[in-house]
Amino acid sequence: MFFLSRDQLRQFEIYYQFLLEKNKLFNLTSIIDEDEVIDKHFVDSLTCCRVVDMSQVSNVIDIGTGAGFPGIPLKIAFPHLYVILVDSLKKRVNFLNELISLLGLTGIYAIHGRAEDLARDDIYRGRFDLCVSRAVANLNTLSEYCIPFVRVNGYFVSYKSVKGLEEMKNCSSCLHLLGSKIIYVDDFALSSQDYRRILIKIKKCENTSNLYPRKAGIPLKNPL
Ligand code: SAM
């Protein structure tokens, strides 16, 4: 359970207005109705706290963050977090940098790059208590992008639709190769009811072999 202060609610309002304004110039989201943005972007992003005690998390990396989901709502709601947002599209990273300064947030950085490349950099590899990712790739591809960033005994939370349940059936050998395993699956309806969210909580049990992630593009073309 957590509460949002007036200032935090104001930050969400500013986020919404800025998203709408920039969405007219380039594609950031297909959801623009205010109530839907609240439900399907803001509240959805925060559901991670159903499966992870955020007070025990110091740093988070969000892979394929797009317009900042789920990383920016998590930073607004849990300001103690040090957050890295990663996206391979420069325009989106520029948007995020403008948004971060508009919201007056500190301890949050938007990085332009591909997960496969950044995960080989010692600054990022094996450093994070928590990795989050929503709507980026199939679970096997995504795990190869995300698990290398997580420290041993840290977590990767994958935000999935019902398709995630299918994807989970084929992921155990992939997760084993990456030194990790699924420890919890949360399956629930968001407040709009028509929108089902599956959160897959994966624990990193041992260091990931230096073989992973493979070169940029390979995890997508040829998933583990
Ligand atoms: N996570 C956001 C959300 O849920 O609204 C954005 C989802 S969008 C469908 C997928 C994003 O992942 C895009 O912004 C894309 O540029 C980014 N992306 C895809 N593959 C990536 C990779 N290998 N490394 C970094 N970003 C990637």
Image (cartoon, rainbow, N blue to C red):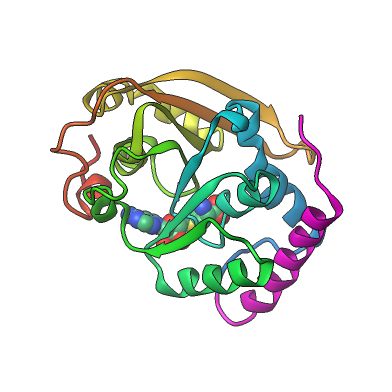
Front position in the image: 77 or 51: 77
What is the chief secondary structure element of the magenta stretch?
helix
Task: Give the residues in magenta.
Answer: 1-26
Q: Residue at x 58, y 60 (%)?
A: 106
User: In the rendered image, which quarter contains the C terminus?
Assistant: top left
Q: 74 left or right of 129? A: right
Labels in figure, total: 0
Which residue ends up furthest to the right in the rendered image? 6
Residue 130: percent from the left, percent from the top? 46, 36
Whole-percent x, y for residue 210 in the image: 14, 37
194 relative to 214 in the view: left or right: right
- Looking at the rendering, the quadrant in which ligand 1 lies is bottom left
In the picture, the quarter occupied by the N terminus is: top right
Between 163 and 127, the one lying in front of the other is 127
From the viewer's perspective, tell me whether residue 33 is left or right of residue 100: right
Question: Dividing the picture into quarters, in which one does residue 142 lie?
Answer: top left
Is 110 placed above or below 214 here?
A: below
